[in-house]
Structures are given as C-alpha cells and as structure tokens.
Image: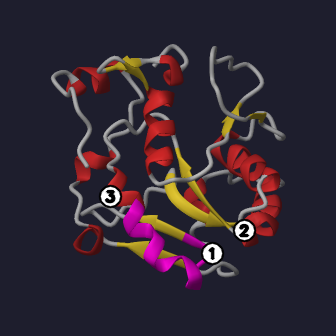
Amino acid sequence: MGRDKATLVIGGQTLLGRAVDLLRSLSLPVTVVLNAEQDFPSLDLPIIRDRVAGRGPLGGLYTALKHTRARFNYVVACDLPLLPVGLMSKLKAHLQKSDIVVPADSHGQSHPLCAVYSRRCLGEIEAQLSGPDLSLLALLSSPRLTIHTVPPAEHGYPDWAFLNLNAPEDLQRMAGWQRLPK
C-alpha cells in the first residue's frame, strides 16, 4: 500500500477505527497491537507493542495472547474493512471445543486474520516463531491444535466480506462503499 493501512480513511473512518468498532459491537474489550514503528494518534484504548518485532502477524498474535488473560480472543486485522459483525458472531458457537475458530470463503481459503484464538495456542505459536514459516496458515495446520473452520454455508457471508486491502487497486474496488454490511 505504501503507507500504514491503519490510518487509511474509508467512509469517514480509519481502517483501525472500523476494526475497533466491529469488536466493540460484540461487547468485547479491545486492545490494539502495534508494531514498534506504528503510531496512531488519539486511541482511547489499550495499546501494546509487538513483543517479537519483524515476525509479522504471527508475532502480533503472540503478543496479543501473551497480554490477555481471556481464554478466547477475537482477532481482527484492520485491513479487512468489509468484515461484517455477524460473521464474527457466528464464530462464537464453536469456541468451547476449539483452539482456533476461523471462517473460510467459498474457495475453501481460511481467513486467520478474522478468527478466534484460545490462549492454548501460545506454545505452538512460540515454537513456530523460532522456525522459518511464520504464516498463520501454517499455524492452522498444526496437528497439536483443534481448529474449526466455519464454511460459508454455515456463516452465510460472501467472499467480498474478506476483501483485504493491500494495494491501491484494492481501494479502487472499495469506491462507492459507504456502509459496512451487518
């Protein structure tokens, strides 16, 4: 994208603000994990700095899970501006029997940056952080964790709900969107 995506404004709101509002609408406490270089003015909520700099989203997830005392933690990347609240609510039904609950799109692709993680994942994440594969998809293939993938037939949302903003072209595709779907 060429700049910090968290500060991008869509429909009068920053991407980070949208993610925070989504989690707050679920009546969840919200903590923001920022990397060492990020600065976001006027956030009225807890901010923690990434404990393992340079390890990508896996490092951010590790930081979040080390910080929290909650058994289950909803994780939402700020660059998913079309993520509906209802989708995140649908994940809740599978928490008690899973370490990770993650939605999938119609192509079977899991979306680990809008998922629910148990603190039981910490040991597996620590082990993965010391290796070469830092992808969250690799975490989802761990045989030591119980992962529940929620298919579109169960969560009921279209693939556009997972639109990830990574390039200016993605912003152009967003043109015209003024409201988020429920």
Residue at 72 percent of width and 29 percent of height: 35
Between the C-alphas of marks 3 and 2, the distance is 25 Å
Mark 1 vs mark 3: give the one in front.
Answer: 3
Task: Name the amino acid type tagged 1.
Answer: Asp
Residue at the far front in the pictured view: 27
Between the C-alphas of marks 2 and 1, the distance is 7 Å
**Badges 2 and 1: C-beta atoms under 8 Å apart?**
yes
- Mark closer to the chain start, 2 or 1: 1
Between the C-alphas of marks 1 and 3, the distance is 21 Å
Mark 3 vs mark 2: give the one in front.
Answer: 3
Q: Nearer the viewer, residue 168 or 133?
A: 168
Residue at the far bottom in the pictured view: 97
Is 98 a magenta residue? yes
Numbered disc 2: secondary structure: helix
The image quadrant of residue 145 is bottom right
The label shown at residue 121 is: 2
Q: What's the image's color scheme?
A: secondary structure
